[in-house]
Amino acid sequence: PSLLSMPSFVATKVGVLLALLVREEYPTRWTSPWQDTWQSLRCQSVSKESLLTNSSRRETMASLDMYLRFLDGISDEIVYPAATPEHDSGNANEDSASAALSSVPRSAAHSQYLSLRREQVKDSLRGFPLGSTGSGAVVAPCVPLEHTDAARIVGWLLDVIATVTSAATERKATATVSATTNSQENDGILEIAVRAAATLKRYLSWVDLRLVTHPNLVNCLLDGMGGADAATVSYNNANTGNDGDDDLGDATAHDDATPGTMLAVECASCLREIVTRGMEEHKKVALLLELKVF
């Protein structure tokens, strides 16, 4: 069926199924799931033109949405398995797509196998040899950082955020339709950038620190924070109910938060994820100087 007519819950299940295939087949029997999937969805290279052209915009957004669901499925099934019920016996309260696909009793041996496979997938994503998991020895990556699949995924997410926000800005500046219609379409486009930033945040906690602190990544996040609506931010700050140390995710819970504000919130959350990773002080200073923050 067409992605345009696929219900969101079905699309989520498809993303989870692809993630489960990656868990079982990558990298030995399925060597390039990321490239194969984005080529099938025709979203390997996101063009601003496809988002500005009425005839292709909806298809492009649907393809991006599906690939983001796939990457979220990878996070749920491989990186953060505690969010899934693999060790349960199928609780009646489980209603997520991941739960529906994997809520079956697991033997201890099978649970150990799944744990090993998850570590192997994460190691392969970061460029480590497949047999390095659990060896106890310090193993160096066998793939240059820029050629790892983790780098490709992070790079793709940054490209989506940058391209989508640029397309929304250009469309707003050159709009020839009614202001209301154009605003709604721009919001829909920006929501893809919000989704991409939220997905990126889930990867920043475990990919190579050199990727996390790359100036291109940090600058993209800083740019994404520039689109917050002042009125919405003020409203959220006035309703924190504490001393101002509110959860960065609260802005997305308010009905009046614009997609620009939600993107700023997600980008700020990504930056917080980078800070919590920790790094040596001299590297922090060097990064701040390189970014010209001061």
Image: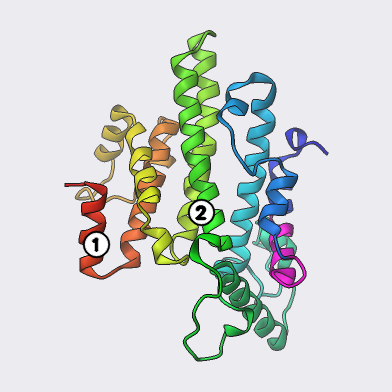
Q: Residue at x 43, y 16 (%)?
A: 173
Question: Rounded to the nearest whole Å, what is the CA distance between mark 1 and mark 2?
Answer: 21 Å
Which of marks 2 and 1 precedes in the sequence? 2
- The outermost residue toward the right is 1
Q: Is residue 215 left or right of residue 135?
A: left
Q: Position of residue 182 (x, y in %)?
A: 52, 16
User: Quick check: is 130 in the magenta stretch?
Assistant: no
**Which element is circle 1 on?**
helix
Q: Residues within 10 Å of mark 1 (few under 14, many from 20)?
A: some
* Residue interval drawn in magenta: 15-30
The disc placed on residue 284 is 1
Q: Which residue is mark 2?
A: 154
Residue 73 drawn at (x, y percent): 63, 58
Q: Residue at x 33, y 51 (%)?
A: 247
Q: Quadrant of residue 273?
A: bottom left
> Main SS of the magenta segment?
helix
Query: Quarter-wise, where is residue 235 in the image?
Result: top left
Residue farthest to the bottom? 136
* Quadrant the N terminus occupies: top right
- Say which amino acid is labelled 2: Val
